[in-house]
Structures are given as C-alpha cells and as structure tokens.
Amino acid sequence: MGEILPVKGQISTELLKFAILQLILTMSVNRKQIGLLFGSFNPIHLGHLIIAETVANYAHIDQVWLVVSPQNPLKEKKTLLNQYDRLHLVQLAIENNPRLVASDIEFMLPKPSYTINTLTYLQEKYPNYAFWVIIGEDNMEHFHKWKNYEAILKYYNLLVFPRVNHEPVLYTELPNVQRLKVPMIEISSTYIRELLRQKKSIRYLVPEKVHDAIMDSGWWR
C-alpha cells in the first residue's frame, strides 16, 4: 500500500541494493562472519560495548573483534596509554562473552596502523572468514582520508552506527554499507580521561572491573 513499483524493465535503487547485498551474503554463506570494531579504547567504555553487542546480535555475525590500535594515524600518540594496558582493559570488559574477542592483531603490523593493511593481513590469515568493518557516522565524514578507502568500499561490508549531530550523507547508497540501529549514548574516552584528571568518578561509564583496574593503577591521573 502506497509503494511505487518500478516501471517494467527498471529496478528500484533499494531493490537493487538489497539484491546485491543478498548476493554478497550468499557468496560468503559458508564463511565465518566477523565484525571488526577498531579503536584506541583509551579506555574502553560502555558505549563501545553497546555497539559491539548490538552487532553481535545480528543474525549473520558470528563474532565481533575489538581491534586495539597501537597508534591511530589521526590521533596524537602521546595521549595513548600503553597498548598492552589498553588491551588488558578490553579483555576485562568482555570476559565471559564468547561473541566478543579482544584482538592485538595490529600490534605486529607496521606502524602507524591503517585499516586497509589490517584487512589485507586478516583476509590472508583467515581466508574462510568474511570481515565487516564497524564504523561511526562521524568517521564516515572523513572516510575519504583513509588509506585506500576505495578498496575498503569495494571489497568489504561496512556497518555504520549513528552518532549524535551527524547525518549519514556519504556512501549510504552502496549495497554493502548498512546502517545500524544502536542507542546513541554520548560517552567518549576523552570525557572519561578528563574526569580522571579532575579526580572525579567514572563509575557506571565503564565496566566495574575496568573501573577497578584504572583506580588501582592510577592511569590518566
């Protein structure tokens, strides 16, 4: 009711996008489907975990790997906690959840780390896995600055999660770019670090074990 059907010989954009996506999924039906959530996780917080768990709930996703970046090319290195300490916090945050995996895969790759390099390495290492890139709408705005972004768009699926005050305008017409419905919780690692510097509480912004580890270590204070 109310839908406009395509004229004979024509296919609507949405129908074509759906058909191509179904073809992509069919071709990879026997491959393990892995969502990749890249981040500095400096530190990991509940916002990260909500996104990861939401993707893990997708019927076609088997696991979500939280890929800890040793150095983000778009961030200052001096603000990062040691990579192994950040990895440890991620491990604490997701323990006992078999659908979420803490990954240190980028620790062994050349620095700085670029997503296309990591994807290429993973695809060679795990040829029977299909990888999905999980990315925020804010990052999509400058996605064209990423190294070899055209190859990522051509060969990989993207799952885009919403951000407050960001409208999806780029690449959303592509069949392999899907938008996620995720609760928008305005929590950032920057905000958490600032609270710590001011000696204020970060309780309920991070998992309890992550909170206790940060308090015991004195990080960011």
Image (cartoon, rainbow, N blue to C red):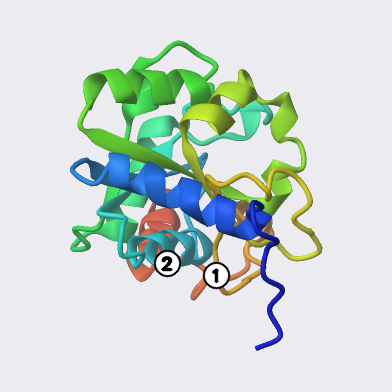
- Indicate the amino acid at tag 2: Thr
**Residue bearing mark 2:** 54
- Residue 139 position, x and y percent, is 68, 43
Give the alpha-carbon distance from disc 1 to disc 2, as whole Å: 7 Å
The answer to whether residue 115 is above or below residue 97 is above
Q: Residue at x 58, y 28 (%)?
A: 72
The N terminus: image quadrant? bottom right
Position of 115 relative to 23 (above/below): above
**Residue at horizontal 60 percent and vertical 53 percent from the top:** 189
Compare marks 1 and 2 and give the one earlier in the sequence. Answer: 2
Q: Is residue 190 visible?
A: no
- Report the side of 97 relative to 65 (left or right): left
Tell me the crowding category of disc 1: few under 14, some 14 to 19, or many 20 or more residues within 10 angstroms, Cα based.
some
Q: Are marks 1 and 2 in contact (CB under 8 Å)?
A: yes
Residue most extreme to the top: 110
Report whether 164 appears left or right of 57: right
Residue 182 image label: 1
Judging depth in this view, the residue of 211 and 14 nearest the camera is: 14
Q: Secondary structure at mark 2?
A: helix
Residue type beneath disc 1: Val
